[in-house]
Image (cartoon, grey):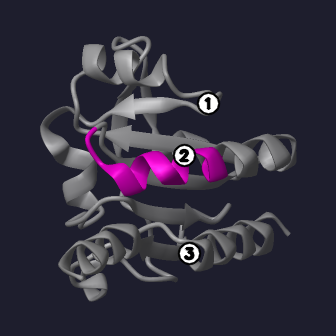
Amino acid sequence: MTGILLLGLALAGCGDSNALLGPGSQAPDISVGASAEPSHVVNLKDLRGKVVLIDFWATWCIPCKLAMPHIEQLYKANKDKGLEVMAITADDSPKVLDFLTHMDISFPTYVDDGSKASTAFNVLNLPTTYVIGKDGKIAYSTIGSSPTVEKDIDEAVEKALK
């Protein structure tokens, strides 16, 4: 019984979701290095005018790994409509690259050196996902991974793309 409860908490995410930055808040300006090219830095403000799904994850996080195929599907279906993905981890680049060789994803991944981006977004648990609208404001935020969360993310992205 305890194992089932722990798995449920892991899939749903745990912690205080009230700590998340809420809809309507201006997204913090963050800069992260691309995991494949550490010298290539991306700034969130440079993506203004596009919808950005930010997914904070880690190589050791089982719910994060379970969420990645859904994010990939969402990215492929919407990248031509203006969706960008920033999958951000505090893990080091070699660990991330090794992890990604086993995953079939095409969306960009970034390394949060010093956890500055996760601090700016009040990330306390993983996975934590934000949808940022074209105006740079937060349209949706959530912790965890589940079919319900995936549906909510899909709806938030669809609404933000309109």
Residue 84 x/y as whole percent = 65, 44
Displayed quadrant of residue 69: top right
Q: Secondary structure at mark 1?
A: loop
Type of amino acid under label 3: Val
Q: Is residue 66 left or right of residue 28?
A: right
Residue 139 x/y as whole percent = 58, 75
Q: Residue at x 44, y 45 (%)?
A: 65
Q: Nearer the viewer, residue 94 or 38?
A: 94
Type of amino acid under label 2: Met
Task: Specify few, some or many for label 3: CA neighbours under 10 Å numbering under 14, 14-19, or 20 or more.
Answer: some
Tell me the residue that label 3 is attached to: 149
Marks 1 and 2 in Cβ contact (< 8 Å) = yes
Q: Which residues are magenta?
A: 60-71
Q: Quadrant of the N terminus?
A: bottom left
Residue 4 x/y as whole percent = 31, 76
Disc 3 from disc 2: Cα separation: 13 Å
Disc nearer the start of the sequence (3/2):
2
Whether residue 67 is visible to the viewer of this picture, yes or no, is: yes
Type of amino acid under label 1: Ile
Q: Nearer the viewer, residue 122 or 105?
A: 105
Whether residue 29 is visible to the viewer of this picture, yes or no, is: no
Q: Residue furthest bottom?
A: 18
Displayed quadrant of residue 37: top left
Q: Secondary structure at mark 2?
A: helix
Tell me the residue that label 1 is attached to: 105
Q: Residue at x 84, y 47 (%)?
A: 77
Tell me the residue that label 2 is attached to: 68
Q: Is residue 132 magenta?
A: no
Q: Nearer the viewer, residue 80 or 4?
A: 4
